[in-house]
Amino acid sequence: MLDTQGLSLLMGDKPVTPEIAFRLIDLRLARMKSHLDYLPAKRFGQLKLVDSAYHCTIENDSPEVVSRTELSLRTFGAFSLFNKREEIGSDSDNRPQSIVYGWGLTRAGEWLLGKILYTRIDLSTLRAVRIELEGLTPAGLWIVAHVQPKEVLRLLSELMDERRRWLLKQYEGAVEIVAANVAEDSLLRSRLDSF
């Protein structure tokens, strides 16, 4: 049977509030739980500070890693860098240092936030120096790193879009999951920027 809880949250003309967005995130994650093992096989450490084939991944920089949980650079899931970067000063060699956040969903269904301290070595080289990893809720991502609920919803939509063909071929019940997300997306996309 088609899950209509998300649709009921989006019906009518009411604006999408953070509370509605967080409820949708919970509903979508619950639907996806049995499929998380099939997320793209990408490690958190494979993120790049610069999106280029010529730049190393953050794990290749051999940064100091601090984790309050079992999360590590080798944790698999779907991850990206949040566009906001904070300049925080210089290192002992007077090279500029900044912080950027990496975040995403692990295959275990946990939200991961990585606070990445990096140094600008020269005009085209950035090196990850220290990474603090922690598991957070979507609300925690918003509070700590200003990752907007709409970004979390977009990530979940992208994951489902990416897996749609595979799911339709592999799982008989996948049609209901996809149908619920597609129906919600049609109502949600036009209103994501309103909050």
Image (cartoon, rainbow, N blue to C red):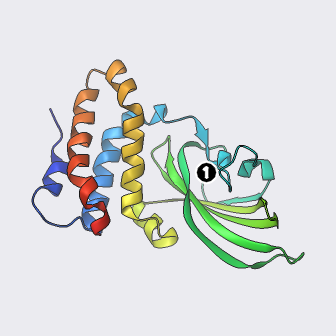
The x and y percentages for residue 181 are 26, 42
Looking at this view, name the residue that lies furthest to the front: 123
Instruction: Using the image, determine if residue 61 lies above or below residue 94.
Output: above
Judge from the rendering whether residue 9 lies leftward or rightward of residue 162; answer left or right.
Answer: left
Q: Nearer the viewer, residue 189 or 106?
A: 189
Residue 152, by quadrant, is bottom left
For the C terminus, the image quarter is bottom left
Residue 53, by quadrant, is top right
Given the image, on which type of amino acid does mark 1 rest? Leu
Residue 132 appears in the picture as rendered: yes
Judge from the rendering whether residue 13 lies leftward or rightward of residue 88; answer left or right.
Answer: left
Q: Image point 27% across, 58% down: which residue?
A: 23
The x and y percentages for residue 49 are 68, 56
The x and y percentages for residue 106 are 51, 45
Residue 73 appears in the picture as rendered: no
Q: Image point 16% across, 49% down: which residue?
A: 7
Q: Which residue is mark 1?
A: 71
Q: Image point 50% across, 40% down: which residue?
A: 107
Looking at the rendered structure, the secondary structure element under dot 1 is loop
Q: Nearer the viewer, residue 32 or 178?
A: 178
How many other residues sit within 10 Å of disc 1, few (<14), some (14-19) or many (≥20)?
many
Looking at this view, name the residue that lies furthest to the right: 93
Judge from the rendering whether residue 31 lies leftward or rightward of residue 13; answer left or right.
Answer: right
For the N terminus, the image quarter is top left
Q: Nearer the viewer, residue 52 or 90?
A: 52
Residue 191, by quadrant, is bottom left
The x and y percentages for residue 171 are 32, 22
